Image (spheres, coloured by chain):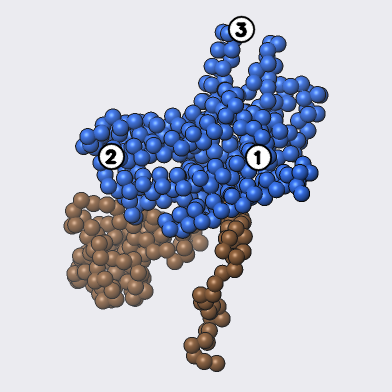
Chain colours: A blue, B brown
Amino acid sequence: MDTAIIIEKSVLIVAVFALTMLMAMYATLAERKVAAWLQDRIGPNRAGKGGILQPLADGLKLFSKEEFLPDTPNKFLFVAGPAISMSVALMTSAVIPWGDKLEIAGRTVIMQATDIDVALLYVFGVLSVGVYGIMIGAWASNNKFSLMSAMRASSQMISYEVAMGLSIIALLMMTGTLSLREIAAQQSGMNWNVFYQPVGFLIFLVCSFAETNRTPFDLAECEAELIGGYHTEYSSMRMGFYLFAEYASMFISSTILAVLYFGAYNYPGMQWAVENWGVNVANIIGFLALFAKLCFFIFFYMWVRWTIPRFRYDQLMRLGWQMLIPLAIANIFVTAICILWSDGNLF
Amino acid sequence: MALQTMSLSGRKKEVSNKKMTFLERLYLWTIIKGMMITIGHLFTRKVTIKYPEQVRERSKVYRGQHLLKRDEQGRENCTACGLCALSCPAEAITMTASERKPSEKHLYREEKYASVYEINMLRCIFCGLCEEACPKDAIYLTESKVLVPSQYDREDFIFGKDKLVMPLTEAMKNAQLKNAN
């Protein structure tokens, strides 16, 4: 029994890890392709059919570059920076429910690496550690521009974490649970949270852009003011890890958006599919549904990137502290009143 | 109408610093409008030309490398009048005139010819004014794809008659074509 669980969980973890890596790889290609398409170009199309092998070529190039180590007293931290970024980006995927359950050889397999009660808190905790990867790497670079970039990135991420947390509280009041699995299960059918929490979704969406350092909140990278960004001193695969971590966290935050607000693996008619086609088929379709939703959000990230110019720094802070946080608090109050009203406890 | 408010193009827009309304300050609607514009570009025809496989069509007035022409009997047209050198805005053309000897009647069409004809390709701007100035139909800018091949020495960019004069075989071919017609 115990070995079966270990094997089952190992397979799941490896599968989720592989999926995250693959998606991050192909997100880089998708980014370039979408950028090209939105600008009436074709994009990379030489490596493989239609450019399908481009991520491999990029990776090979990064691997073959010289690993430059700047003259810094913090060599250990310099190496630790990208490692933290990368592991944090990958750790979040542990609690995501990819589907309800599968039935293999009489065993019920939950399509989730770990089902912990405080999954949502775990996600937030791990995401906030992400800022350390950037901060430590830039600090160890012994370069004032890198440090300035990291200051921008970290103050931005910390500011928007507040609004993000507040927007989630309204959702928690509705769902009454922190487990992502239960939140997903509550949204069966078309009972998606986005219909009940549109403002919360909007705040969460804007904050996810800020958390992943994507345009219009990509102030951490700026050639004109900061030479490069927090990774100016990095080269070879360490640099690759930073870039890769950005795409991995984009993938994860797209998934979380889909799970929290867009019904996770649920699709209309899932109940019917379970009864008629069996649990396995229904859940594989469910996984594909989740996959389609998160792909849409990844596309959305890129779509926004090529539409909206970046904020000025004071605008960024004003939006975070003076707009989103009051709005999130108001959202909590409105949600509370609605819940009381629907329970008949108001007045 | 006052001069300050007049619009010649009809597209003049008065700039105002009026305070934005609450809805305008949200920017949400504007962002959605902008995103609709960008998504529209996802489906437009791409302008890229896949270069080695596809080659952009040349303009009809394309001007490539120069050619000093021969007539149907293989004689050089140029009489070294110097009008091309005079018309050249970049002063790229120089020549030395010589008198034709009786034994050279099959080589040059008229009594005077250019014994040296040089174009400095570093100076040439391919404007085609030499072609327009030539009264003898001697110099032409061709449709050649090669403009000026790269070289190591500046001297190599001065193209002499060896590179400029039309090869005899081509002159023969032209003559045959003309006879056939």
* Residue A191 visible to the viewer: yes
| Amino acid at the residue labelled 3 | Met
Label disc, if present, on residue A141 of the rendered structure: 2
| Amino acid at the residue labelled 1 | Met
Quarter where residue A168 is shown = top right
Residue B144 at x, y percent in the picture? 38, 57
Q: Toward the viewer: A225 or B39?
A: A225
In the image, what residue occupies the spot 51% across and 62% down? B181
Q: Toward the viewer: A320 or A223?
A: A320
Considering the numbered disc 2 on the image, is that residue within a helix, a strand or a loop?
loop
Name which of mark 1 and mark 3 comes first in the sequence.
3
CA–CA distance in space, label 2 to label 3: 49 Å
Quarter where residue A117 is shown = top right
Relative horizontal placement of residue A166, taking residue A335 as reference (left or right): left
The vertical placement of A217 against A180, above or below, is: below
Considering the numbered disc 3 on the image, is that residue within a helix, a strand or a loop?
loop
Label disc, if present, on residue A173 of the rendered structure: 1
- Residue to which mark 3 is pinned: A1
Residue at mark 1: chain = A
Q: Toward the viewer: A64 or B28?
A: B28
Considering the numbered disc 1 on the image, is that residue within a helix, a strand or a loop?
helix
Marks 1/2 same chain: yes
